[in-house]
Amino acid sequence: MRQVPMEPLIVTLLTISLHGAAAVTHSLKYFYTASTGVPNFPEFVSVGLVDEVVISHYDSNTRRAEPKQDWMSKVTEDEPQYWERHTGVFMGIQQVYKSNIGHLKQRFNQTGDVHIYQVMYGCEWDDETDEVNGYEQYGYDGEDFISFDLKTETWVAPKQQAVITKHKWDNDKSEIAQNKHYYTQHCPEYLKKYVNYGSSVLLRTELPSVSLLQKTPSSPVSCHATGFYPDRATLFWRKDGEELHEDVDLGEILPNHDGTFQMSADLKLSSAEDRTRYDCVFQLSGVKDDLVTRLDKVRSNRGETEIRSDGDGKHTFSSLSPL
């Protein structure tokens, strides 16, 4: 990681992240948030995640880096001073980022007290192909400020106020070389280590329960899958075995409080449609068989109907009455 406390903006954090688009892709990412004038919120917060699971935390109130998963305590077996070392690093970054906000206020000609400076960095690793990738992105007051392009080994400045930083960092060839090493070597090495520590949690698969919900006979039918893990999943509607793209509204994958995920896909169809021709398909990366839920004739009572799937294609129908 790079720290340049005397320079106008910045510290360059080498970073790495892995985003999982397939079952064999893992990610390590860190979020840093520095702020001024935000009531009841620490001036600096660091959160680390592996495969979207929070593994570490530090903030300027506790002034201590600590594990957020039991299995992350294993890191001290190889590095006894791991958490103490990270605490020292975060304390240093905390001071630099506070200074950076001051520089940014000058660049943007700002006088207000409430400002937020954020960094997201990390790496991705495909455990089948061994391909790695990394990224580092900076934001200020909710907008992109500058980011590192690992492929071109250059900085991208979407804001005019970031151009001076781009030129400075592009000309620092030794720092760019260090960044490249961090994203392609150092970060993936730690990611592999963390995945190994938490394999019983991170490499598990959990199938969801699937429900078909419809408020009125003319409302869209919502296929809702919840309780699945990991978040590398697909949900879609079919008609006569063919995937539908029109008249389908696909929602985002959202986290549940227990660490699993949920998502939904809404299907618009007329009441005259033959519903036996439709089904909802859930696919979980790493699981061979699809979870198929057929849409049969819906019975409604007081305008609200729920069709629940027990996971093997059979259904029970229960009418819901508003309270």
Image: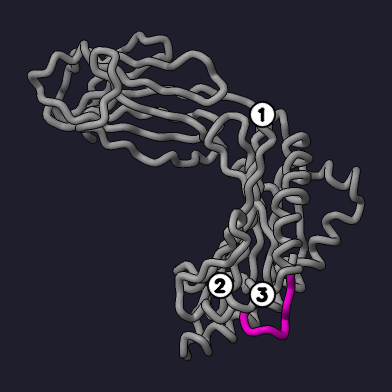
Q: Secondary structure at mark 1?
A: loop
From where the camera sits, is residue 51 visible?
yes
Report the number of discs. Answer: 3
Amino acid identity at mark 1:
Glu
Per the image, the residue denoted by label 1 is 128
The numbered disc on residue 171 is 3
Which residue is found at the position 43% from the left and 39% from the top? 253
Over which residues does the magenta segment extend? 2-10
What SS does tag 3 mark? loop
Q: Residue visible at 62% across and 57% down?
A: 121
| Mark 2 surroundings: few (<14), some (14-19) or many (≥20) residues within 10 A | many
**Picture disc at residue 182:** none
The answer to whether mark 3 and mark 1 are in CB contact below 8 A is: no
Q: Which residue is mark 2?
A: 117
Q: Residue 251's spot in the image, x, y percent?
A: 35, 39
Which picture quadrant has residue 168? bottom right
Cα gap from disc 2 to disc 3, whole angstroms: 23 Å
Q: Is residue 274 above or below residue 57?
A: above
